[in-house]
Amino acid sequence: MTKILIENGRIIDPANAVDAVGSLCIADGKILQVLTPPADFTPDLTINAKGQIVCPGFIDLSARLREPGHSHKGTIKSETRAALSAGVTSLCLPPDTKPCIDSPAVVEYIKDKAEAADYPRVYSIGALTQRLDGTELSSMFALKQAGCIAVSNAHAPLGNLLILRRAMEYAGTHGLLLMYRANEASLSGKGCAHEGAMASQYGLPGIPVAAESIALAQALELAQLTGCRMHVSQISCKQSVIKIQQAKKYGLNVTADAAIHQLHLSENDVLPFDSHYHVIPPFRSEEDGHYLREGLANGTIDAICSDHQPHDLDAKLGAFPETEPGIASLETLLPLTLELTSLHRIDLHKTLASLTQKPAAILGLQAGALTSGFSADVCIFDPDLPWQVNEQTWHSAGRNTPYWQQSLIGKVTHTIQGGRLLYKFRNR
Amino acid sequence: MHRHLQLTEHGKLKHFLSIEGLSKRLLTEILDTAESFAGISEHQVKKVPLLRGKTIVNLFFENSTRTRTTFELAATRLSADVLNMNIATSATSKGESLLDTIRNLEAMHVDMFVVRHALSGAAHFIAQHTAPHISVINAGDGQHAHPTQAMLDMFTIRQHKKQFAGLKVAIVGDILHSRVARSQILALNTLGVAEVRVIAPKTLLPAHVCSMGVIPLHDMEEGLSDVDVVIMLRLQKERMNSAFLPSESEFFKCYGLTETKLQQAKPDAIVMHPGPINRGVEIASSVADGPQSVILEQVSNGIAVRMAVMTMTLGHHGGAA
């Protein structure tokens, strides 16, 4: 296998508290040594990373690849290419594929497709309930055996709190992480925008903050009761940050993430009836965004995910409420994360940890760090390189992003997965 | 964005989708133009040749007899050809997308779409995606806007009150679900009234109603005190089924407009309603048919205002005016 030497880069590895200019040696698919290369190291490939940052490959807790079932929106092949170009070397696939991930056969199918796409680190999240219908528990043990890294009901509602309680107990029985997106469906209803000034003005059905925070409060109570290891996915508001902060303070073993775009955009950024801003949970108030960033800075929010949801053109063509929610967001993950530092002054080590060390810890993966002996999943990026989001630079099959045609700063230049250089940026 | 979408580069009206972003000058121009059309309906020959040769499509994705009829009359009186498309029972229910419907009609070389749709933002979407020579008039989209209704209301107010400065206006009823109220609020504030009050139970007010430039009140007597204009909104029956209200009778008790409650308003206050009215639910018959009611004038004014908007939007690109 290829020996790779990455030299002259600024190596940032939050897990090992490394931030220094030096070299990174990769051999046999693994991290060999950090900062100073061994005297006898003879690389097959040398990457000069001068002026660039070398860090562990990113781990995305939620990225939809649209396969199986929605391959007109994207495929495992197209979306894992997008992931590599974004420096993402491991990703979790939510269970709302079609068929959904409620049987080992679907897990196997995804595994095969991922292997064929030369991107083995697609981690399936199993369905919490059969068909995601919220009533009967899925065969979680079988799903775990097949390789599911966690269980979740994705955006689908659960029938009642008893089912959530039993699901927590049963997932706990098999040592499975439960990923939970908090939403009280009776309160969010057919809403498509944050219940705030913008929705009031434009007459868009609103989703109140309480739809999330009430469901979260209930789930936290049940996690306490059952001792279930719960990760809260894609929180969007101040109340959720406060509730998670309190739960952590009182010793509950809970973690949380936020989608990268939620850390940047608010209802005030939504262009009237522009469906590219249609996302669930919706863009909240400026104050909510502020609390999310605070929560990330103080560790209440552990991880940043892309919440990547590529769509075909038709899905976004229509009157705002009837369009499908979601943003193709893998490829804007890095530049927007860097903006958290440049614009909002959140420590770069913290934001990088929330893309590497923290999600690895949440999933219990031996990844997200440049530790000797770990699989060599490495991302090299130029933090100052401006680029435009357009047909030439984009990889995802979904072009549904509010950042289309915009210039962003910070570009992944090399992505190494398992010691193999799988992506190299060519300035076209 | 609205401004760019609705106006030409010379600041003329291209589409009429929302009151948002339109200037006081432009709204006044609409009212003045409508004024010049108001007389036509009384002529022996109720027609002017301004839009001769133009084809106007009434594209109604949601049923509405009254609004469609007044648009049709307005177009006919301008000598345009009118095509009525009731899409609620046609193409899209067969799975055709909104965009396909538009494309097909475009291919028939039409000049204007008058659009009514159940979803907020539908008229904007059509305006954004239609061919550049076509004008779009929003005849009501979801809970967002109904700008021609708002302008005919402004026209009626101006007829009776001469000017907007100093007026106190109360809008009563289901503000939350009302595209009419949203457009009225924008128009009233742009034209410079002194005060817009909205009177409703909390269940029927938008969550952030204060950001809309109104004073929200829950008590009818307090809300009507000293107002010049009372606008009643229609209450949809289905509001009773989804826990917005306990009953029609309780709503009428609290928010129905009766002669007694109307006494709180100025003696020369006018009473308006976009129709169709629910007698005994939001308004007592004695008030609806009483001396202060201008409800039927609103209907006639609707034709003149729609004629004005049609000529203004079509006028700028080789139309008639």
Image (cartoon, coloured by chain):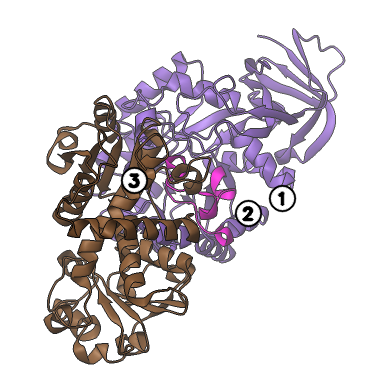
Q: Residue A346: which numbered mark, if any?
A: 1
Membership of B14 in magenta stretch: no
Q: Same subunit under labels 1 and 3?
A: no
Q: Decide which of A188, B48 is in the foreground and name it.
A: B48
Q: Decide which of A16, B214 is in the foreground and name it.
A: B214
> How far is mark 3 from mark 2, CA to CA?
51 Å
Residue B60 in the figure: left or right of residue B121: left
Q: Mark 3 falls within which chain?
A: B
Would you name the residue on which mark 2 appears? Answer: A293
SS of the residue at dot 2?
A: helix
Dividing the picture into quadrants, the one containing residue B57 is top left
The shade of chain A is purple
Measured along the vertical axis of the image, is residue A315 above or below residue A283?
above
Q: Mark 2 falls within which chain?
A: A
Farthest front residue in view: B44
- Answer yes or no: do the residues labelled 2 and 1 have beta carbons within 8 Å? yes
Q: Residue B135: which numbered mark, if any?
A: none
Residue A147: x %, y % from top left: 41, 30
Residue A215: x %, y % from top left: 39, 60
Q: Decide which of B53, A90 is in the foreground and name it.
A: B53
State which chain is coloured brown: B
Would you name the residue on which mark 3 appears? Answer: B311
Measured along the vertical axis of the image, is residue B232 above or below residue A3?
below
SS of the residue at dot 3?
A: helix
> How far is mark 1 from mark 3, CA to CA?
55 Å
- Answer yes or no: do the residues labelled 3 and 2 have beta carbons within 8 Å? no
> Magenta residues, as a range?
A259-288
Q: Can residue A46 be seen in this view?
A: yes
Amino acid type shown at disc 3: Thr
- Between disc 2 and disc 1, whose residue precedes? 2
Which quadrant is home to the C terminus of chain B?
top left
Q: Is residue A352 visible?
A: no
